[in-house]
Amino acid sequence: MLDYGLDLSGVERDLALPGLVAEGEELDALVSAAADWSKPTPAAGWTIAHQIAHLAAADANVLTAIRTPEAFDAVLKRVEAAGSGHADREAAEGAAEPRSALLDRWRAGRTEVAAALREIPLDQGFPWFGSQLTATLMVPLRLMETWAHGQDVFDTLGVTRRPTSRLEHVAALGVAGRELSFHAAQSPLPTEPFRVELAGPDGETWSWGPENAAQRVEGSALDFCLLVTRRRPRTETGLTAVGEDAGKWLDIARVFL
């Protein structure tokens, strides 16, 4: 997971929340029209049904954390007891449900999560894996995960996905996750500042960091988001790096463990 001490002061819940809803609706339209949910996706051992089951399970955990935080300790203990294969087993259980039941459960969960994240005060923390969160971080996190797992389904079905401005929220998490990337690779965190400049889908430029930073990353926002969500290797993107540390970051970039 992410280092939840991230500085996401530029993220506004009320701007990101419609994007989260739209991301779910786009994936819903795709899977609803797909005749076969048993097709294998790029995630080893996961079919389309596994992908949807995983998203539904994550939404259920979010609702527990927000609505009954005192019960979230049981979620943590269950995950810890299951070990590293927890996500696979959980997805497999959901994938075994009848397709209509799983789809209904995912739809209901998405709706409830959006409502819960809209209603909770911005400064109210709730438990999550590894730390306390607020809606300011959880909204883009859910958007990112929906987009990433949705990409697996788009790839499986051979459907070209039109990039949208919602990628800015995913990219912001990717930039903020630089420390996590070096930590996961067991490499020292660079001390120099970084500049990231990404071309958005509508011709805009999204940027982070000081303009005069020697360590620089540039390219399309889509490529950057595919990289940090581990959906494409660096060699399959057009991203460029200036500076040794920037280059190393692109080799190890991620937004979750």
Image (cartoon, rainbow, N blue to C red):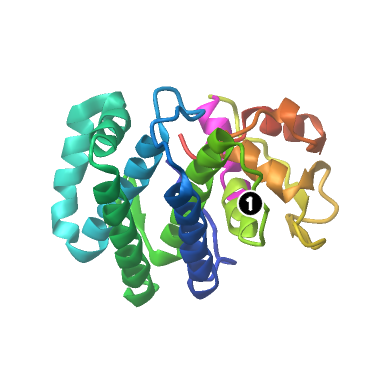
- The quadrant holding residue 92 is top left
Q: Position of residue 31 (x, y in %)?
A: 45, 47
Q: Secondary structure at mark 1?
A: helix
Count every numbered label the image shows and give the total. Answer: 1
Q: Position of residue 74 (x, y in %)?
A: 14, 45
Q: Decide: is 13 above or below 218.
A: below
Q: Was residue 88 drawn as part of the magenta stretch in this picture?
A: no
Residue 128 visible, this angle: yes
Q: Was residue 182 drawn as part of the magenta stretch in this picture?
A: yes
Q: Residues within 10 Å of mark 1 (few under 14, many from 20)?
A: many
Q: Is residue 229 left or right of residue 39?
A: right
Q: Position of residue 57 (x, y in %)?
A: 28, 46
**Magenta span dominant secondary structure:** helix
Frontmost residue, 192 versus 120: 120
- Residue at 71% x, 29% y is 234
Frontmost residue, 130 versus 53: 53
Specify the segment rendered in magenta: 175-185
Frontmost residue, 185 versus 74: 74
Q: Position of residue 30 (x, y in %)?
A: 50, 50
- Residue at 34% x, 66% y is 111
Q: Which residue is mark 1?
A: 171
Residue 62 visible, this angle: no
Instruction: Say what amino acid the circle numbered 1 marks.
Output: Ala
Q: Decide: is 87 above or below 159.
A: above
Quarter of the image for the C terminus: give it: top left
Quarter of the image for the N terminus: give it: top left
- Residue at 73% x, 29% y is 236
Q: Is residue 243 left or right of residue 129?
A: right
Q: Is residue 131 left or right of residue 82?
A: right
- Residue at 58% x, 50% y is 176
- The quadrant holding residue 238 is top right
